[in-house]
Structures are given as C-alpha cells and as structure tokens.
Image (tube, rainbow, N blue to C red):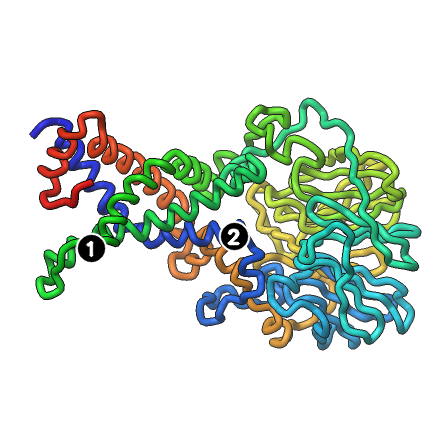
Amino acid sequence: MTVRRLSFRVSKTIHKYLGLVVGLYLLAMGASGLLLNHPEWIRSIDAPQSLVPADYSYQNWNRMLIRGGTITADDTWYLAGKAGIARSNDQGRSFTILDEGFPASAYDRDSADLLILDEESKDQILLAATRSGLYQKRGSSPWAQIILPGAPSSLRMVALVETADRIVAFAEKTAWQANVATLDFTPVELAVTEQDSAAKVPLFRVLHDIHNGAILGTPGKILLDISAIILVVLGVSGLVIWFVPWRNRKIPTLRQPPGTFFRWCWKYHLKLGIWIVVLLMILAGSGIFLRPPLLLATITHSLDADNPLLRFSPRSSGFGGKIQSATTASNGTIVISTENGLWHGPADLDGKFKRLQLPIPIHGMGVTVLEGMENNRLLIGSFSGLFVVEEHQGRIWRLQRPGLQESNPYQSNDLVSGVVMAGGQPVVRFDYHDGMLPITARQPSLPVMSAEIAAAAPMSMWHYLFEFHNGRIFEPWLGPWYLLIIPLSGIILLLLCLSGAYDWWCRCGKNNKRAKQLEGSVNPGAPPL
C-alpha cells in the first residue's frame, strides 16, 4: 500500500468517525449560531420549561433575574430585570408585576434600567429600558412604547439617565434626549475625543468579533450566516453519506441503491466543504478561545485600536464597543460604561466624551452596576466586585460581600449583577449565583422572592440557545467537565476541516483518474463524483 493511499485511508477514517461523534452537535451549533446572530427571528419564543435544566431555576433573585432597582421616599420598591418591572408597596414583603401593556415574551420584556419621574406624585411616570425598546407608564395607565425617531421598532435600550432638565435614553450604539416635561425624544450625537494612540482592544473581544462576523461589519455578518447554513448542510449530508451504506450493509431488507438525495449529499458535501473550509477553521479557532479554560490564555492580551485587523470593526472608532450602562455624577457629568471601558462627558451632551481611567478591577464581561452617589461618588460593580469611587479625592474602596473569603483577588467569587438604590445609597446587592445579599452583615432581613416573580421570567429561546452554544447548558450533567465541550468540539472541527480538505485533494486532485482509482480501492462501490 502506497504512502498516499495509507494516508488517505487514515484521513478518511478520522473524518468519518469524528464526524459521527460530533456531527449532530456541530449541526446544532451551526443552527444555534445562525439564530443567535438574528435574535429578531426568535425573540417572541420562550424555551419550553421541560427543556430547561433545574439548575436554571431562580433562587433568591439569582442568575441576573434583577438588573437593578430603586426604593422611593415612601418605601416603595421597584425592581427591573428579566421579569420586567416589579413593584412592592409593603417594603418588599410582596411584589406585583407591572405587565399591562408590557411586551409578552421573556426576551422582549427583559429590562435593563428603570427611571422614576415625579416620584411623589400619584401620576408618577415610569420609564423602562427593555430589549424591545423604551416604554413609559403614567400613573395607573398601562405601559406604552415610546417611538424613538430613526430607531427600529424593537431596539435594545440599555440605560436611562436624568439630568437637571432632560432625560437621556441610551441604546447600545446611539442615544436620544428629551425634555423632562414633554418626553419628546430626539436623536443626539455622542461624540468622543480622538482615541489615545495607546488605546487597546482586549483580544477576547477581537476573537468574539471574528467568531460572529462583526470584525468585517455587515459583510462579515452575512458571511457568518452563510457559514452557519453550510455547517448545517454538511452535518446533514455527512450523516446521510454514512447512514445509507450502513443501512444497506446491516439491514438487507431495507437495502436499495443510492438515490438522488444521497448522490446530491455526496457531491455537495465535498464541494461546500472545500468552499467553506477556511472559514470553518477560523470559526473553530476563534471559538475555542472564547470560553474557559482557553479564554484565560487571551485575557491579558490586547490589540491597538488602529491595528489593521480592526479596520472594518466598530471597535476602531467611537467608544470602541457597545454601550452597557450610564449614569449621572453629582459634578454634572454623564458616565458611560462600554465594552471598551468607562467614558465621561458633559451632562448637556454639548461636548465630547473622554476616556475615564480608574484603578479598579472590572471583569471582562463588563460593568454590571454603574450608579451615581452623593458627594461626587460613583458605584461601579462587575463580576470582580463592588467598588465606591471618589474620583476627585482619589479614594477607592470595596464594598466587601458579607462572608466572602478570597485567597486570590483575580479569581473573585463576588459576581455582582445588580444593586437596589435608595436615597443615592446602595441598600442591597445581587450576586449572580447567590442572589440578593445585604450590603453589610448587620442589615435586617431581605425580601423573599415569590414564585410569581420566577414564573414571570421564563428563559427566552435566544438565551437558551446562547447557553447551549457556550456549553453552560450541560453543566448540570457534566459538572466542571462541561468546560471541555467548547475546546474539544472546536479542536474536532479543526481536525474535520483538515482531514476533509485532504480527502478532497485526494479525490479531486490534479490526477483525476488516479484519484478515482484511489477512492475505488479504499471505498469500493462509491458513487461516481
């Protein structure tokens, strides 16, 4: 047996059996990636409760059920989060979901921020920033969506800021402002100073943009969609190519000659695979570094904002990433949190935003808490802890989670996901895993999460697919070993691409006659190409 024939046999075996092991999984990864890239296709669908692992049920307001909240002067609690907007008139002993007129699906009602106007009036106004737009509620009236000029009907809003005479509503890339009295919103341009030449973009953000196509802008998104569809086709056609010969060998009663569909699968599995092999390798290579443990290899690395690789990326200009949150400081500025750090600018928006450098640790996932406090203080929280910043005094201190003992500050268990504010001070905090916690160990008892709150926040289909795509959905069954799913599946996809490309070269190389002889000797009876 020649070396080429032997190597072809080995490559073909690797491609076949690795494909059988992960074929359905990769097919599902392609389909889920396509849907994650287009949330508008599935935003109205909630995941059936029977598909959601029990570990995803809410306990004590955990798993980012609550994004934030406010306690008004009359001790009324308002909470914003995945269930929408909840209110308690009895100091947190019971809550009512304010859902009349609010979006119905879990994805659309997910609320990032709540602003209360005319707090002491019976006709107080509530403004809610949701994944499906900006909503207002006046007194006892139902919620009504505010149409923002120039915005699509379902635009994700991330923050609401009240200054002396205006309201600013932030989306991920744009903003609108309105007079407090009229709430007639108009677009506003968010200008930034020229980025410092030393500005950096975290490498894992770059890899994420490569993985979802954003690195090339709109053409990159289209290219990713095509790649995801072809990955699904490759998964289906590969299983058909294996199943038909297996059925004919193992189940004689069902034996029949390969039909048109089988021949189509055989032909286009080869053609589509070789057309897309480089893109699939890029997707696999970037994907394995987006989740632990290999994510740790990228977390300390970054690229310059003017790197040629970022020429078509939105990270090379403006804020360098999506807006995540915003607040006002008592010194008359607006502070914005983005994927690329903190920025501050004039509250009247008549000026450019400048980068705000603060010596506090912020988790790679970004800021989860950004609140203005009295005496020109800022409250900043992430999965690396909760901090109070006195910028002008140069003082920074951590609001230690009660009972937390850490041996390594770089492996924090203080996963802050939200706070409830009262009178410009944090009253309670939320941990991703443990839910509602007191700010101090001496704090009195906290509100108990009711079953109605949990029932009002089913998992959306988009979030279910997101948990599947990053592998966390398997944690209840695999424990910490679930962390190996993404790197192993990515490495297998790389091997499938390499072996598939080699098989194609052997079958369809320059010496086509010799290639057919080689194929016939390794796989007698294979259909002609």
Question: Is residue 286 among the parts visible in the rendering?
Answer: yes
- Placement of 33 over or under 357, stated as above or below: below
What amino acid type should be assigned to the residue bearing mark 2?
A: Leu
Q: Quadrant of residue 479?
A: bottom left
Q: Nearer the viewer, residue 223 or 487?
A: 223
Considering the image in quadrants, where does the N terminus appear? top left
Q: Nearer the viewer, residue 449 or 236?
A: 236
C-alpha span from label 2 to label 1: 35 Å
Identified by mark 1, the residue type is Gly
Q: Position of residue 120 (x, y in %)?
A: 91, 68
Does residue 500 sit above or below 103 in this rendering? Answer: above
Mark 1 lies on residue: 259
Q: In which quadrant of the rendered image does the C terminus lie? A: top left
User: Residue pushed farthest top?
Assistant: 197
Of all residues shown, which one is farthest toward the front?
260
Q: Secondary structure at mark 1?
A: loop
Mark 2 against mark 1, which lies toward the viewer?
1
Horizontal arrangement in the rendering, residue 187 relative to residue 46 (left or right): right
Viewed as shown, does residue 97 lie left or right of 240?
A: right
Q: Report the residue at 91% width, 70% height from top.
A: 121
| Relative image position of residue 167 (x, y in whole percent) | 85, 53
Q: Which residue is mark 2?
A: 36
Q: For residue 439, say whether it is visible.
A: no
The crowding category of the residue bearing disc 2, from other C-alpha atoms within 10 Å (few below 14, some 14 to 19, many at least 20), is: many
Point out residue 334 in the picture as x, y percentages from the top left corner.
82, 44
Task: Please state which of residues 309 and 62 is positioned toward the viewer in this rendering.
Answer: 309
Decide which of tag 2 and tag 1 comes sooner along the chain.
2
- The label shown at residue 176 is none
Q: Position of residue 460 (x, y in %)?
A: 55, 63
